[in-house]
Image (cartoon, coloured by chain):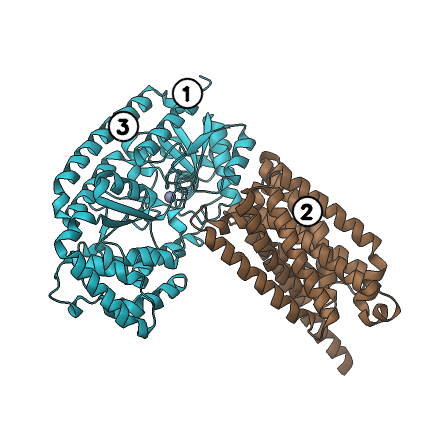
Chain colours: A cyan, B brown
Amino acid sequence: MLDDMMPAPPPRAGMGKSARHGTWGALEGGALEGGALEGGMQRCGPAPSSPVGPHPAAGAATLYLRATASLREPSRFPRLGGGRKVCRATRRFLVGVPTKPMARGAALIAVLIAVIAAGPRAAAETDPVEVVATFSLIGDMAAAIGGERVSVATIVGPNGDPHVYQPTPDDARRLAAADLVLANGLGLEGWIARLIAAARSDAPVVTVSDGIAPLTFHRTRAHAAIARYRRCQTGNRLDVACARGPLDYEDTIGTDPHAWHDLANARIYVANIAAALTEADPAGAETYAASLAGYQRRLAALEDTIRTVIRRLPDARRVVITTHDAFGYFERAYGLRFEALQSAIADAEPSAADLAYLIRRIRRMRVPAIFVETTTDRRLIERVARETGTRIGGELYSDALSPPDGPAPTFLDMIGHNIRTIEAALNAGR
Amino acid sequence: MIWDLVIDPFVAFGFMRRALVGCLAIALGGTPVGVFLVLRRMSLTGDAIAHAILPGAAVGYLVAGLSVGAMTVGGLVAGLTVGLLAGFVTRATVLREDASLAGFYLTSLALGVLLVSMRGGSVDLMHVLLGNVLALDDQAMVLLAGIATVTLVALAVAYRPLVVDSVDPEYLRTVSRTGARVHYLLLTLAVINLVAGFHALGTLMAVGIMIVPATAARFWHRDLAGILVMAVAIAVAASLTGLLLSFHFGLPSGPAIILCAGGAFVLSLAVGPHGSLLARRVHRRHLRA
Ligand SMILES: [Zn+2]
């Protein structure tokens, strides 16, 4: 009994993970906090020169854009409109401008013609606001709030893993042409600072998670549990009351970025997005407010569904096993317990100790089903399912939407799909 | 005590048994091939071929998803193409083997990186490309066992020419065309074993279990048979120890196994009976006396 409850392996020293997190921290502390993300809304103007060097992948784009950067300074045409609209129009033109100095003159003329022809007022009516979202969930929210007034591009698309994305020069071009950049923040997009620096984008970067109560995470739930058992053990004896006590959250290595799984946070996300859109395009304020109100109502309805589903589950079945630790906010908000094979930092390779720990847990708790996540490698969790004789309960979408023909093409669909999948799998065979 | 530390993990957990059997298969098939590579001063060839396999496997994944079959075929095609082309160029032109191999594998690697980034944005590909010894499924197990069997049979059949050619390549080249055939056979065996190892340990770690025990075994025996047996024994011991370290101390399994082999290498280098630091010093003292 005690042997069964006591995982033999000690917690893993933060191999790789803490180092990686250090990089995130550096990025956050440097470019993100000091500049882009914290800076909030900036008016159109020359990009501040960033101390962060360009990423190799975006190197070509950097050269390309640097060659055209001088053209983008508004001081060159100070009286032509003087506002954001002109900047937007010129910027979009210049993204397609060739790099040779010879071509600059031609480009400049083309821009002048365009600006004069379009005129500052006309542009406001026809042009949608160009929004770049870092990953699919935020892109979908922006499209839902903005409707026809915005055109949304997403950097990490459906089924893509935002933790480990490698930006391409194409992304830098899209950023340079954007009027507004929406990022999750909380350390999710470690690559965004370099990308913004490389693209020399002067669009305001809005952190949509601003205002939520962040959750810290520990290496993995497994490691925190192991630490708890060690704390409660003296010699060969285990203090059972202590071992059933709360998990020790001291062993944290950062902020959990997956805040959207708590729909109260999702409400803050869409409110932030609506505010950012309103600032970028004041003429659309009413539209944005109306779609925001509609979206909030649907979020509230969805939240009711989630609470009802979980209330109906018997206590013993309120455990969900997944591949990576993405549901901490869901757990805190709705009281369903989640255990994951991998820490939320997806590139840390699980050890034999992690696997053994999870298998012991599943055997003891008689977990009815295991879930795979669409953005992670599923081989290990399938091994665990085989070994414990547990069913694979289905796919959960945690960090990315599905393609349009999949079961989770929008954020609301995604949350609905997840709760229905969990409900079906945990209720099966009762 | 011993039971709890060594036996119980394998009794209680199927994934540990699978991992051990997978490592045994690589040790039996790959390590002897590694011994011949070391003997022919081709230790780094394994590394080059491993890099050449990676893009092939990546293409297999992009075409057919996470399937053992597609990734194996892709890796085999890329590895064999590079290995055989390099061998051919070496024998047909003035370029030496290491240089031609470098030229081909770097090209292959670049092509792979290009293809992968063009697809981009999906599940992190490096994650997929790094096999995990803890996640071996039935297909991968069958593949590993099959390749180990084929390798052992091939080595047994071609043992004599392999030994002769490895000791004195000029001799076979002058008397027959066997030399070239032996060379290609060895390259082919290296490729298929690295593809097998790729599923279990990831390509780069697979080179480790192939070459490191072979280099360590050199310090323990002079005759080839002795070196072969010793190398396999070191590979098996390193696999077992590495897996147990991963189990008890939470280390990632692949690196733990190779580090154990590396430890055996450093130990052999220091105190092995033949040509090690210690043996040389003792030998010199003998000469002076
Ligand atoms: Zn995640």
The x and y percentages for residue A34 are 22, 60
Left or right of residue A369: residue B50: right
Q: Are marks 1 and 3 on the same chain?
A: yes
Determine if the C-beta at disc 3 is less than 8 A from ligand 1: no
**Residue bearing the label numbered 1:** A427
Relative to residue A6, is residue B81 depicted above or below? below
Going from the N terminus, do you reach mark 1 or mark 3 first?
Answer: 3
Determine the secondary structure under disc 1: helix
Q: Nearer the viewer, residue A54 or A158?
A: A158
Do the residues at discs 3 and 2 belong to one chain? no
Give the Cα separation between the discs numbered 3 and 2.
52 Å
Residue B204 picture quarter: bottom right
Q: Amino acid at mark 1?
A: Asn
Chain designation of label 2: B
Question: How far, Cα to Cα, is label 2 from label 1?
Answer: 42 Å
The disc label shown at residue A302, or none: 3
Query: What is the x, y in percent for residue B252?
Result: 52, 49
Give the CA distance from mark 1 to mark 3.
Answer: 20 Å
